Image (cartoon, rainbow, N blue to C red):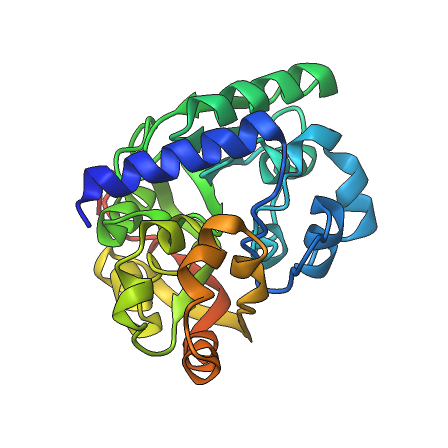
Amino acid sequence: MEDNEIKRAVRERYGRVAREAGSCCPSSTCCGTATPQEIVEKTGYSEEEMVAAPPGSNLGLGCGNPLALAAIREGETVLDLGSGAGFDSFLASERVGPKGKVIGVDMTEEMVERARANAKVGGFKNVEFRLGEIENLPAEDGSVDLVISNCVINLVPDKKAAFKEAYRVLRPGGRLAVSDIVLRAKLPDLVRDSIEAYVGCVAGAARKDEYLASMRSAGFENVRVIDEAPFSLDCVTSDPTGRSVLEGLPEERRQEVEGSIASIRVIAIKPVGALRKGG
């Protein structure tokens, strides 16, 4: 698959999700007809967090809670990669307080528009949403304290570029906290080569060792997997496009695919001695 083809498919898919305010359920614990609220509850959010953000910001698109990985301090600047309708950005804004700032970046115009509308409705003054790609972030060098991302980097064709950009925008000593989907083993060609599975957060996932190596090659240190859990294929087959790819697989092959996928939560640090520009 060509990178431009992948990006176009992802942009179209999540643009549709933003317009329809539905969930494609790409999380590690969701299934069937679970609502967005049920999904975020299962992926590590508290009841207080679920009611703190505007209702229209929770589309149930995550695979974990990256905010639980890093202690956010008042006055900090947080950058949310693939911010969607703004759910994690709004939760972060409460923690950084009025002297802090949260920047959400998403490649889908419909998502950015929806997030901005949610911010207006919720009266969030310290959050802004920017249209842009993770591999080329609309943010200055060394301008943020914490980068978070929730089940998005797996959708990026060039993950090394994504982590290099996250490293670039962080201040020395800044932190990275990511929830994402990775592979434990190689996927069957049918799934790996499928655009439908890609936008469902499966075919675009990297091998776990390669994913972590990409973080380290960008310059990050103290890269640690905080937890890891199996990824249920029910989260893919509950969506029509994902189901069209997987329903033809024999049961043993389906189990093989399911055993090859995991959700992980990872933290890392930009070294204090790193040069302010890039590294």
Q: Is 269 in front, or is 60?
A: 60
Is 49 placed above or below 260 here? above
Residue at (73%, 21%) from the top-left corner? 122
Q: Is 1 in front, or is 180?
A: 1
Residue at (54%, 60%) from the top-left corner? 237
Residue located farthest toward the left when viewing the structure as drawn: 2
Residue at (74%, 31%) from the top-left corner? 55
Q: In which quarter of the image is residue 209?
A: bottom left
Q: Is 193 in front, or is 42?
A: 193
Is 262 placed above or below 241 here? below
Give the number of marks. 0
Residue 236 x %, y %:
52, 59
Q: In which quarter of the image is residue 5?
A: top left
Q: Is residue 32 among what the camera can see?
A: yes
Q: Is 220 in front, or is 197?
A: 197
Is 245 placed above or below 128 here? below
Residue 176 x %, y %:
44, 52
Residue located farthest toward the bottom when viewing the structure as drawn: 252
Residue at (27%, 43%) from the top-left corner? 6
Residue 152 x %, y %:
43, 48
Q: Is residue 169 among what the camera can see?
A: no
Is 204 placed above or below 263 here? above
| Horizontal side, residue 121 vs residue 74: left or right | right
